[in-house]
Image (cartoon, rainbow, N blue to C red):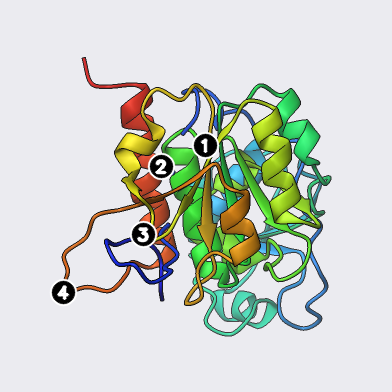
Amino acid sequence: MNQMARNHPKRRNAHGPAGPGDAQRPRQDGPRERSHGGSGEGWLWGTHAVSAALANPSRTIHMLLATENAAARLGPARVTPDIILGKDLDNRLPPGAVHQGLAIKVAPLNPASLEDLIDRGLTRICVLDQVSDPHNLGAIYRSAAAFGFGGLVLQTRHAPPVTGVVAKSAAGAVETVAEARVVNIARALEQLGDAGFHTVGLAGEGRRNLADAVAGAAKVAIVLGAEGSGLRPAVAKACAELARIEIAPEMESLNVSNAAAIAFYEASRQRFPAG
């Protein structure tokens, strides 16, 4: 998991924020979810994911399932839950789904475009270059919401759909962080640059550390590469600069979601310093 950072000449994908309110509004657009017949298509599960979906007025809810105890914990909701046994809920969802007694079947959020994100006035955006693990994607959503990144940009191909696994890992952030899918990441970076974003790719060969790279930038787009392979050459070239996260020499790299959290925090700290 070659994610992101270090002071090494070899290419590494290293894998950071927005105005404080950028990620707080209920999201009105997002990716289309692909069909995974028999594996929980359309279902989100877990307390945070279900509660966030119920709180998002842009979410169309088809069905809410809950165990008796979970329904009591959930309290009043805009959809009345169907009470179900835990073992029956297990059978509705993919093997190993940690549902905490709650699952909700929803329609996908309407798709966004990169222009939508720019027109919203977001100041912090994350661009993912072929990050493929759904748990990593969910964790990046969660960190984006925590540190004020209002939007994620992914490729239309070579990126996971937003499924229940992603939503569970995101702990509700898929409802508040807007997502746009683009055909060409390098071209999207050029478009972001034209819109005033300083595009910073995380890579071990970056000449400056991340803190220096994001300092003073009014708009920042942090670019993170795929697990293992890092940023593709064309994507790295399209960034305004490459930056690194300093880590101990004994470690080769960071996982992409960990690097993302560090980068998002650093960019937020630079823009909104303590005191």
Q: Residues at badges 2 and 1 in contact (C-beta under 8 Å)?
A: yes
- In the foreground, 85 or 135: 135
Can residue 268 be seen here? The reply is: yes
Residue receiving disc 2? 264
Quadrant of res 92: bottom right
Q: Which mark is residue 250?
A: 4
Q: CA distance from mark 2 to mark 1?
A: 7 Å
Mark 2: secondary structure? helix
- In the foreground, 94 or 67: 94
- Residue at image location 50% in from the left, 29% down from the top: 18
Which is nearer the N-term, disc 3 or disc 2?
3
108 vs 239, left or right, is right
Residue 181 x, y percent position in the rendering: 76, 52
- In the foreground, 176 or 263: 263
Q: CA distance from mark 1 to mark 3?
A: 15 Å
> Marks 4 and 1: which is nearer the front?
4
Could you tell me the amino acid type at mark 1? Phe
Which is nearer the N-term, disc 2 or disc 1?
1
Q: Which mark is residue 149?
A: 1
Residue receiving disc 3? 258
Which is nearer the N-term, disc 3 or disc 4?
4
